[in-house]
Amino acid sequence: MDLQLAGLNVLVTGAGQGLGRALGMGFAAEGANVAFHFNSSASGAEKAAAEATELGVRAIAVGGDLRSAADVAELVERTESELGPIGVLVNNAAATKVQRFLDSTPADWAPQIDVTVTGTLQLTHAVAKRMAERKAGAIVNLMGDSGRVGESGLLVTATARSTTVGLTRSLAKELARFGIRTNAVSLALVRTDNFDEHSGGADADDERTKKILAQYPLRRLGRPDDITPMVLLLASPLSSWTTGQVVSVNGGYAMP
């Protein structure tokens, strides 16, 4: 199926590694030009951009701290000056930490709120203003299922992620008049190259992981290629009558 993404310019945040990188490559494989955003994973984003270019599209690695308004303005300007108008924004970047709430301090909370909430708001505001002027655009927000159903040991992360639901639905209602669609994809655990950081270091064969898998009807964790098709579809013009939705892609871990 042709998703009609060829020639569109896509900005994917947190795309120097893991799921973000896979999403960027997925768009490139469909013929879209891609800006792989990174904060600290410069080499990964640059390598991804080089690989995407080999697919016959234009691609760049663009750095910036989403907590900085100046960085956000610069990365959006560079993306549009080198690729062209941003047609699709994928908000994937987030800060997470596995930690019991009673063991945490405000210093632990700040990075998660600053990146996941404030950073996403700043970038979305900058890109949406340009989309509104052109009266076209699609935004896809990534979030964790912890933000929908709660998760022990991820309370602050869940709090930050839960804002994605309100953001997605509010953007959908407010920006529809400008031809901008906004949807979200909610995930459970996805095994990526930085899986250990987000799972607390669980090994695939240890007892803890077996207990985790028992919570999934499909009896496995997700892979980046399980998530990519849904994100591409929601970004596609084929989803032109879909907005304000939160779609779960989670192996059955949580069912609305």
Image (tube, grey):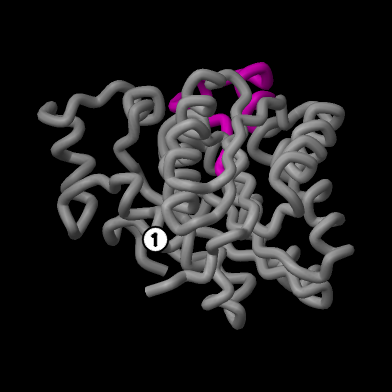
- Residue 125 lies, in percent from the top left, at 82, 49
Q: Nearer the viewer, residue 170 or 83?
A: 83
Q: Which residues are magenta?
A: 92-112
Task: Decide: few, some or many residues near mark 1? Use Cα within 10 Å; few <14, some 14-19, many ≥20.
Answer: some
Judged left or right of residue 125, residue 100 is left
> Is the C terminus in the top left, top right, bottom left or bottom right quadrant?
bottom left
Residue name at image x 61 percent, y 47 percent: 91
Q: Nearer the viewer, residue 141 or 96?
A: 141
Q: How many numbered marks does the figure carry?
A: 1
Determine if residue 118 is in view.
Answer: no
- Amino acid carrying label 1: it is Pro
Give the vertical position of 140 relative to 37 (above or below): below
What residue did someone put label 1 on? 229
Q: Nearer the viewer, residue 136 or 191?
A: 136
Give the vertical position of 162 relative to 179 (above or below): above
Q: Does 95 appear in magenta?
A: yes
Secondary element under disc 1, as helix, strand or loop, is helix
Q: Does 183 appear in magenta?
A: no
- Residue 36 lies, in percent from the top left, at 57, 36
Judged left or right of residue 165, residue 152 is left
- Residue 15 lies, in percent from the top left, at 52, 35
Give the vertical position of 55 relative to 204 (above or below): below
Residue name at image x 27 percent, y 57 percent: 251
Determine if residue 42 is in view.
Answer: yes
